[in-house]
Amino acid sequence: MRKTVKTAGALLGSLVLAGALSISAFAMTDGTYTAAAMGMDGDVTVELTVEGDAITDVKVDVSGETPGIGAEIGDTVIQQILDAQSAEIDGVAGATVSSDAVRAAVTDALAQASGEAADTDAELAFTPGTYTETTSGYNGPVEIAVTFDETNVTGIEVVNSAETAQVGERHRH
């Protein structure tokens, strides 16, 4: 039963994040909720205040993000969240990773408000094997292979890429 509840919660969170389901369809408990998600250079933190099933206040901390890019999106995404009353926001062009982190944190905070908080102790189970996927990169197709055992990702390999070397790699301090 516990695994079914965890799976249902994960599915609900995925549907909300993907925009397939609006969290506002669920009753929310008044209060202030805080959540964080990994941005480009560290955690992005969102604090939402909910009153009467509405988001009434939003604080976004992107101060650890890239100066001049992700660190500058706070005011824009706050207004987007208030307007959308959900995590279904456009974000900011050029700050995709930071925008995605804001969406994920808002989704988590709204899940808390609706009583569907994510279970961080959830057990993962994978079908062992290597899975490949090809997607469009800037300069052409990018093929990635991800290998799993029963409970872990054991390897990630870029099989084929026409991308410029060193561009698009995560910034390191």
Image: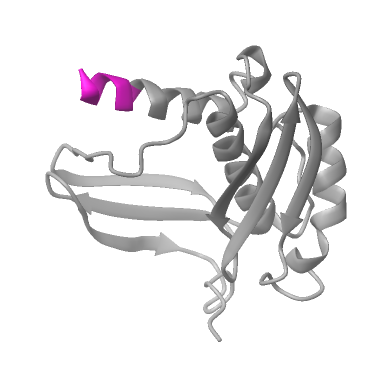
The residue lying toward the viewer, choosing from 115 and 151, is 115
The residue lying toward the viewer, choosing from 38 and 93, is 38
Q: Residue at 87% of width from left, 42% of height from top?
A: 79
Report the side of 63 relative to 113 (left or right): right
| In the depicted structure, whether residue 60 falls above or below residue 157 | above
| In the depicted structure, whether residue 84 falls above or below residue 22 | below
How many numbered marks, from 0 up? 0
Q: x and y percent of residue 90 in the render?
A: 77, 39
Q: Quadrant of residue 110?
A: top right
Q: Main secondary structure of the magenta part?
A: helix
Membership of 6 in magenta stretch = yes
| In the depicted structure, whether residue 1 falls above or below residue 147 | above
Membership of 54 in magenta stretch = no
Q: Residue furthest bottom?
A: 173
Q: Quadrant of the C terminus?
A: bottom right
**Magenta segment, which residues?**
1-7
Q: Quadrant of the N terminus?
A: top left
Q: x and y percent of residue 107 in the render?
A: 59, 36
Q: How is the image coloured?
A: one colour
Q: x and y percent of residue 139 in the render?
A: 60, 61
Q: Residue at 22% of width from left, 25% of height from top?
A: 3
Q: Residue at 28% of width from left, 52% of height from top?
A: 146
The residue lying toward the viewer, choosing from 65 and 171, is 65
